[in-house]
């Protein structure tokens, strides 16, 4: 059995990003192609 949870599993994803809103914002800002910092997501 693996020591860590699989981040691709739905329950793991929901657990991590459901409890940590700041991670959701950071994750989306890293993935989405914004042209300027003003367009980035500030809060959820």
Image: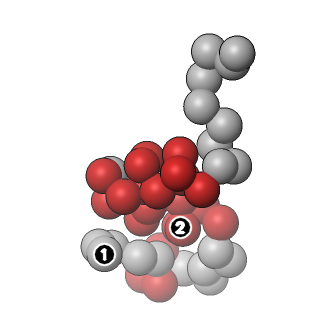
Q: Nearer the viewer, residue 6 or 26?
A: 6
Instruction: Name the residue carrying label 1.
Output: 44
The residue drawn where x is 69% and y is 49% is 8
Q: Quadrant of residue 30?
A: bottom right
The N terminus is located in which quarter?
top right
The residue drawn where x is 63% and y is 43% is 7
For label 2, the SS is: helix
Q: Nearer the viewer, residue 19 or 29?
A: 19
Viewer can see residue 22: no
Percent position of residue 25, x then y: 42, 64
Q: On residue 20, which mark appears?
A: none
Q: Nearer the viewer, residue 13 or 26?
A: 13
In the displayed orientation, state which residue is furthest to the front.
1
Q: Is residue 1 above or below residue 22?
A: above
The residue drawn where x is 31% and y is 75% is 44
Q: Earlier in the sequence, mark 2 or mark 1?
A: 2
Instruction: Name the residue carrying label 2.
Output: 29
For label 1, the SS is: loop
Percent position of residue 33, x then y: 68, 77
Viewer can see residue 27: yes
Q: Nearer the viewer, residue 10 or 22?
A: 10
Q: CA distance from mark 2 to mark 1?
A: 12 Å
The residue drawn where x is 60% and y is 23% is 4
């Amino acid at each position: 059995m693996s020591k860590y949870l699989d981040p691709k599993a739905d329950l793991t994803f929901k657990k991590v990003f459901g409890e940590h809103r700041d991670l959701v914002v950071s994750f989306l800002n890293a993935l989405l192609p914004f042209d300027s910092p003003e367009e980035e997501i500030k809060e959820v």
